[in-house]
Amino acid sequence: MWTILRDRITTRTTTTMPCSFLAQFHSFPPLRSALFEPSPPPSPHHHRHHRHRHLPPPLSSGFSGGGWSPAIRSFCSTSGCERRAMAGRLESCSSDPSSVSYLTQREAAEIDEELMGPLGFSVDQLMELAGLSVATSIAEVYKASAYKRVLAICGPGNNGGDGLVAARHLFHFGYKPYICYPKRTPKPLYTGLVTQLESLRVPFLSVEDLPPDLSTEYDILLDAVFGFSFHGAARPPFDDILRRLVGMRKSDQTNKKSPVIVSIDIPSGWHVEEGDISGEGIKPDMLVSLTAPKLCAKQFHGPHHFLGGRFVPPPIAEKYNLRLPPYPGASMCVHIGKAPQVDISAMRENYISPEFHEEEVDADPIKQFHKWFEEAVAAGLREANAMALSTAGKDGKPSSRMVLLKGVDEDCFVWYTNYESQKGRQLSENPWASLLFYWESLNRQVRVEGSVEKVSNEESEKYFHSRPHGSQIGAIVSKQSSIVPGRQVLHQQYRELEEKFSNVNLIPKPEHWGGYRLKPELIEFWQGQQSRLHDRLQYRPQEIDGRRVWKIVRLAP
Ligand SMILES: NC(=O)C1=CN([C@@H]2O[C@H](COP(=O)(O)OP(=O)(O)OC[C@H]3O[C@@H](n4cnc5c(N)ncnc54)[C@H](OP(=O)(O)O)[C@@H]3O)[C@@H](O)[C@H]2O)[C@H](O)CC1
Ligand SMILES: Cc1cc2nc3c(=O)[nH]c(=O)nc-3n(C[C@H](O)[C@H](O)[C@H](O)COP(=O)(O)O)c2cc1C
Ligand SMILES: Cc1ncc(COP(=O)(O)O)c(C=O)c1O
Ligand SMILES: [K+]
């Protein structure tokens, strides 16, 4: 079961999560992963708690201070009254549970001090994690294949240090970083970071070395100039650099491809709380807030707002009443804020693949399929055996769904399902189907069409009992494609059967569960090419001297 993050953060602040199904559909992959998180296993009273599911902030729930060292306990022993007073200063503490916390400048600095004081962190550690968060956020949105050249402009403080760390990680992710670090801090932490980058032969450029037009030389401009300690107006040489970043965005209108600007924690030059007061500041495409967004982030309306710095311990979250979205999986960053607006009509890929020639394919399409399938597995594709199965009943209306290929035997493609499902009914009325594989990162598609029959009961039995215990019970519980009154019904039946079969060696396969085998009459191998001039090699069987041989033709793309 999945819980939508919308329950945890939304409305009131700038970080409104899309709530309609369509908005979720429109959200791009990193956001999608951020939008969903597994919810706890269902409890019998689950439905009663449903309304309050979002109430405890995820990071602070269950915090008691127990089990921590005396230093941390004393840090945490702040009275409820003090906590409320602190919380009162925080935007996060509104009664609206749906907002992400925004920090004032003072709170940001205070959290920094507490992390590096009683909570035992060193600045090196936090900077490393911050820089890594920035690099992973960039890598989620701007792929190295299209945005290789990164200019990191680093300021004199820790924000600049984050930029140096991020540049190092980006190097290892396959980007080509350059550094402009005009006011170096002579502390071992910073000199070490510089040495590390020099050992990677990352070029350091002085302000004078920077090309006159930043937009032609770089794909990403990493703004690591000022963070939350910025105050007043930018002084030289940063005033000029920031002007160039602003100017560069303005020349955007001239149709030139301009690089994207990624700001670390604060768009440099913006007031930490008031934001872009003059309206003349830089307009980053991506903002990576660290720990929690600062108040100025409310004015960030660029397409990509990420949160990084996955190091906030519960005592901090509790004390500052931080309301933050959960990070997905093992990720160092999470996309927050609105889903970027996408122009669906403009979404397209240009496929670049080696040419695919008649001479190189196997005369036997099944052997050719095995070859491509092995390459898909070797390329690390998840579920390379997932295929769209299309069927149509006697009304002739087609329907498609994904199923898993479970083998290719005697030239036939095999999958397993419920014979009483919609597809089962359709196949009983019309035993013809088509299969479709799409191996996206290889620019490959395989179409298979043919007649379908059931596999033998013995074969189905054998496969059924090879499946995990839970899936066997699941197959008994699921009257596939029939209406169920609610999820709890499935769980209830599942629990009953689990109990029933707890001491049983072999769970009986339901009669109506088994395999189908499709005997191909057509197999087509498709490989994407530039300008839509794709390769399509189609195999069809022919009778020659009473033998079935495959004829290969090339089709227009
Ligand atoms: N816990 C966290 O969230 C972590 C955050 N990190 C990053 O650290 C920065 C904050 O770092 P800090 O060093 O406190 O501040 P800045 O990076 O903003 O830089 C301060 C330096 O900038 C100079 N400064 C300030 N204003 C100006 C100005 N108008 N013109 C020129 N120079 C300016 C300032 O000099 P002063 O003489 O004015 O004091 C400092 O030299 C945070 O935003 C995160 O990016 C950590 O890396 C990890 C933990
Ligand atoms: C990747 C993937 C693999 C699936 N594999 C199977 C499968 O092997 N067998 C199956 O019955 N359903 C499988 N399903 C579920 C089907 O897509 C579908 O929801 C179900 O079979 C009911 O389809 P029907 O109502 O058209 O018969 C899979 C779904 C996905 C997304
Ligand atoms: C309903 C259903 N049945 C069967 C399968 C195939 O699963 P298995 O690999 O366990 O046979 C799937 C896979 O997603 C499924 O969703
Ligand atoms: K910055």
Image (cartoon, rainbow, N blue to C red):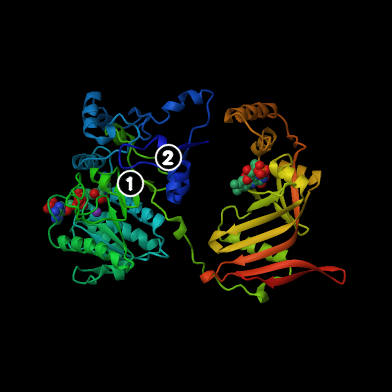
Spatial CA span between label 1 and label 2? 26 Å
Task: Tell me the quadrant of the picture where the C terminus can be found.
Answer: bottom right
Secondary structure, mark 2, is: loop
Image quadrant of residue 537? bottom right
Against 383, residue 174 (above or below) is below
Residue type at the position of mark 2: Cys
Query: Would you say the residues marked 1 and 2 are in contact, meaning their CB atoms lie under 8 Å apart?
Result: no
Query: Which residue is labeled 2 in the image?
Result: 19
Q: Nearer the viewer, residue 203 or 41?
A: 41
Residue type at the position of mark 1: Gly
Give the mark nearest the N terminus, 1 or 2: 2
Q: Is residue 66 left or right of residue 522?
A: left
Label 1: few (<14), some (14–19) or many (≥20) C-alpha neighbours in 10 Å: many
Image point 58% across, 73% down: which residue?
355
Q: Which mark is residue 309?
A: 1
Image position, residue 258 (x, y; %): 31, 65
- Disc 1: residue Cβ within 8 A of ligand 1's nearest atom: yes
